[in-house]
Amino acid sequence: MKKITLLIVIFLVFSYMIYSIFIKKDGSDFVEKKMVTDSFELSVSYPTLLEVGDVMEVEATLKYIGDKEMWLEHGSGDMIIFVLVDPNGQPVGNNADTGTGVTTKIGPNHEFTNMEKFKMKKKGIYRLKVFTDGLYQNNKPIEFGNVIGGKIFDTSSMYMDNLEITVEGN
């Protein structure tokens, strides 16, 4: 009986160590947020807790959930744009490139994905903004009607604001 208990304890300790190393990604807690409209779903995955010096990886996917093929007009660069604001309100490394206008034929479940890395240099609360490039069909903006602080931001973009990341340490 003591051997079985000892084996169970060793197994649990070993399992926790593996979880900490491979799943938790340096102690960070990852969350996924989604925004859904009639035709599109924007999801973003990001850590909520990091240490000073860590590199934060943010990934977002824009998925067409409509049921018919369509021609989507957008920029040739990044379809999804990330803006990270540090605890002092300063932008951190926004490398967005929306490029020139192009048209892409998309069908149900078509996805656009973007990933960006940010070096976390200061302790404090960071704010992440995630939005799509302007999306158009037949030279008309696709109306998402995002309301940011009581104002219309840009009806042709899907927009998530104030995603909070805490950075601890020195």
Image (cartoon, grey):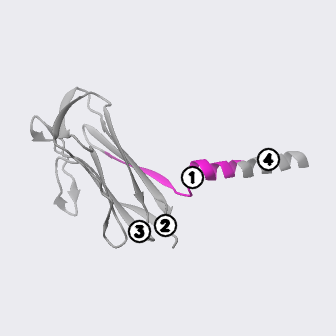
Asked if marks 1 and 3 touch (Cβ < 8 Å), the reply is no
Q: Circle 2 sits on which residue?
A: 52
Identity of the residue drawn at 43% across and 71% down: 124
Q: Distance between the residues labelled 1 and 4?
A: 22 Å
| Residue matched to label 3 | 125
Q: Do the residues labelled 3 and 4 touch (CB within 8 Å)?
A: no
Q: How far apart are marks 1 and 3 (CA)?
A: 20 Å
| Residue 65 coordinates in the image, percent (x, y) | 29, 34
**Is 54 located above or below residue 40 in the figure?**
below
- The residue wearing badge 1 is 24
| In magenta stretch: residue 127 | no
Query: Could you tell me if residue 47 is visible in this image?
Result: no
Location of residue 126 by image quarter: bottom left
Q: Position of residue 48 (x, y in %)?
A: 46, 59
Q: Earlier in the sequence, mark 2 or mark 1?
A: 1
User: In the rendered image, is residue 40 in sight?
Assistant: yes
Residues tagged 2 and 3 counted as in contact (Cβ below 8 A): no
Q: How far apart are marks 3 and 4 (CA)?
A: 40 Å
Q: Mark 4 points at which residue?
A: 8
In the structure shown, which secondary structural element does the residue marked by tag 1 occupy?
A: loop
Camera-near label (2 vs 3) is 2
Marks 2 and 3, how far apart in space? 11 Å
Front residue (pair 96, 83): 96
Secondary structure category for the residue under label 4: helix
Tag 3 or tag 2, which sits nearer the N-term? 2
Q: How crowded is mark 1: few (under 14 residues within 10 Å), some or many (20 or more)?
A: few
Question: Which badge, 4 or 2, is on the more N-terminal residue?
Answer: 4
Part of the protein shown in magenta:
15-35
Q: Residue furthest left?
A: 139
For the residue carrying disc 2, how many other residues have a C-alpha within 10 Å: few (<14), some (14-19), or many (20+)? some
Work out whether residue 77 or residue 81 is closer to the camera in this orientation and state it. Answer: 77
